[in-house]
Amino acid sequence: MKIDRLIGILSILLQEEKTTAPELAERFEVSRRTINRDIEDLCKAGIPIQTTQGAGGGIRIMDGYRMDRTVLTSKDMQMILAGLRSLDSVSGSRYYGQLMEKIKAGSSEFVSGRDSILIDLSSWYRESLAPKIELIQDAIEIRKSIHFRYYAPNGDSEREIEPYYLIFKWTSWYVYGFCLLRNDFRMFKLNRMDNIIHTTVFEKEREVPFPNMTKGKEFPTKHRIKAIFDASLKWQLVEEFGVNSFKVMPDGRLLFEHDFFDEEYLLSWILFCRDKVTVIEPEYIRNEIIRITSDIIKRYEK
């Protein structure tokens, strides 16, 4: 991917006094023309790169503007490499691992010692998720719209979007883009997408707002729940919502208050806790739980 290659080239320029286009082309397995375009893009991004022709020439960061090598310390580089390694856990390939090796090459000053951070972003859905991520990544890079079937709590729909970002958040993967159906920017969960295909190249230049991933922005709060949990579920509340998500009552039970944006998820989570939880409010959630459990009882009484 182009962005990965740009990061790799910048890393090499920070670590070495000088390199050449043929050396970079060989290292990243692309043409010299591609490397020249990459250098031009880095210059446009404000990186002061100087190229000189002839014997002794090459590519380097301009004298007087060289960034202090401490900008990327050994610890910083280890964090970058850990992030690249984590992407392989969902990509279903060795692409990022290979990129990591290319960055490591000749960089022992920056990358030393053992790997102490291991990140696995894969899920139970890795086999179906990895192809989706690769297809959407390609669509973002070549500026192609994608068409897919989307399964949501309020029903299925056919969607076409101009994709701009792949996002890992809240233990799940999402794609953020401009939805042609809603004529607005939307977030879609990859696990709910099916039959994804590339469609047309989108030429229209849009002002793309950066996804606001702070709590309650992209997924505004709709349901605030207040419930009492059995003390035996303390570990689950801590794991999912943190140690400050509840108060211990005098009898040892746990008073829990939290905001949820998805009613279906909220109901399924409450039902998963079985008789270890009692919802205090809101009333409409209590009524819905009563309805669901009554329907379940009727099914088993037949």
Image: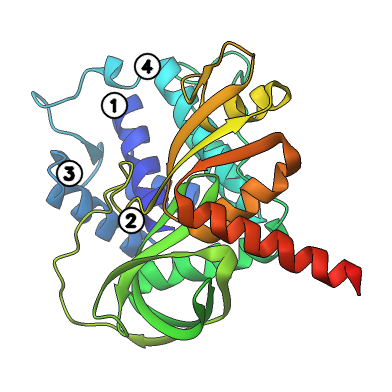
Quadrant that contains the C terminus: bottom right
Is mark 3 in CB contact (under 8 Å) with mark 2? no
Is mark 1 in CB contact (under 8 Å) with mark 3? no
Identity of the residue drawn at 71% across and 35% down: 276
Q: Earlier in the sequence, mark 4 or mark 3?
A: 3
Query: Mark 1 = which residue?
Result: 17
How would you rate the neighbour count of disc 4 (Cα within 10 Å): few for under 14, some for 14-19, many for 20 or more? some
Query: Mark 4 = which residue?
Result: 73
Distance of label 3 from label 2 (alpha carbons)? 15 Å
Identity of the residue drawn at 49% across and 76% down: 154
- Whether residue 29 appears in this view of the structure is no
Distance of label 4 from label 2 (alpha carbons)? 25 Å
**Residue 164 on image: x %, y %:** 32, 65
Instruction: State the mark number for residue 52.
Output: 3
Query: Mark 2 = which residue?
Result: 35
- Whether residue 131 appears in this view of the structure is yes
Distance of label 1 from label 3 (alpha carbons)? 13 Å
